[in-house]
């Protein structure tokens, strides 16, 4: 029997540890990044995944999994930036940045559980390549909303798109058995 909640937690535990370790190495230098810069970082990661999925040869010995992890962590950083705004200088301790990470992932997991219930775990029958395409689509939506100065008429906001990207990346990593 599959336990989506536990699989999700296992993936996030790895992502969180990497985030915390990078905070210890670099501090929170990412706090100076404007939202479009974070969106572009996520775009680069998703585009690389798609390229790896389509090309037979690789010149860099890194697979898709680290890129999905990057999508998760950059998306959480973006959610933090939405809440706090951009800083002029790094301004968060490791503990505060980790507390914010946990806060954002808790809300994102709650969203996943609600949607997963309503959709009947349909993602389990999806291909990793489709999840990649959905992430790219969400990125393009975010870019359009950013170009519209954050205004939408009938669509969900930027934060919901980042949350969906996190959840799609977690699903991809579960499919790849990354969590085990």
Image (cartoon, grey):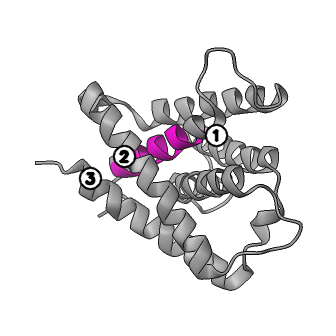
Helix, strand or loop: magenta stretch? helix
Say whether disc 3 or disc 2 marks the residue closer to the N-terminus.
Answer: 3
- Position of 108 with respect to 3 (left or right) is right
User: Which labelled disc corresponds to residue 110?
Assistant: 2
Residue at image x 59%, y 55%?
76
Q: Residues within 10 Å of mark 2 (few under 14, many from 20)?
A: few
Q: Distance between the residues labelled 3 and 2?
A: 10 Å
Q: What element carries label 3?
A: helix
User: Which labelled disc corresponds to residue 5?
Assistant: 3
Q: How crowded is mark 3: few (under 14 residues within 10 Å), some or many (20 or more)?
A: few
Of badges 3 and 2, the one in the foreground is: 2
- Position of 86 with respect to 48 (left or right) is right
Task: Identify the residue under disc 1.
Answer: 51
- Position of 175 with respect to 65 (left or right) is left
Residue at image x 48%, y 64%?
102
Residue 149, position in %: x, y? 83, 30
Say whether disc 1 or disc 2 marks the residue closer to the N-terminus.
Answer: 1
Is residue 165 shown in magenta? yes
Of badges 1 and 2, the one in the foreground is: 2
Q: What stretch is highlighted in magenta?
A: 162-174
Q: What element carries label 2?
A: helix
Q: Farthest right residue?
A: 88
Residue 125, position in %: x, y? 29, 30
């Amino acid at each position: 029997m599959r336990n989506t909640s536990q699989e999700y937690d296992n993936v996030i535990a790895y992502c969180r540890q990497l985030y915390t370790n990078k905070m210890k190495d670099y501090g929170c230098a990412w706090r100076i990044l404007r939202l479009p810069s974070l969106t572009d970082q996520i775009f680069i990661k998703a585009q690389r995944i798609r390229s790896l999925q389509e090309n037979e040869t690789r010149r860099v010995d890194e697979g898709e999994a680290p890129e999905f992890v990057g999508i998760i962590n950059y998306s959480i950083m973006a959610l933090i930036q939405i809440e706090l705004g951009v800083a002029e200088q790094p301004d968060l301790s490791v503990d505060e940045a980790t507390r914010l990470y946990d806060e954002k992932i808790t809300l994102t997991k709650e969203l996943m559980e609600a949607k997963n219930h309503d959709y009947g775990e349909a993602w389990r029958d999806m291909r990793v390549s489709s999840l990649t395409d959905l992430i790219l689509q969400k990125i393009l939506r975010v870019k359009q909303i950013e170009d519209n100065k954050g205004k939408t008429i009938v669509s969900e906001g930027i934060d919901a798109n980042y949350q969906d990207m996190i959840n799609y990346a977690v699903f991809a990593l579960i499919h790849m058995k990354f969590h085990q």
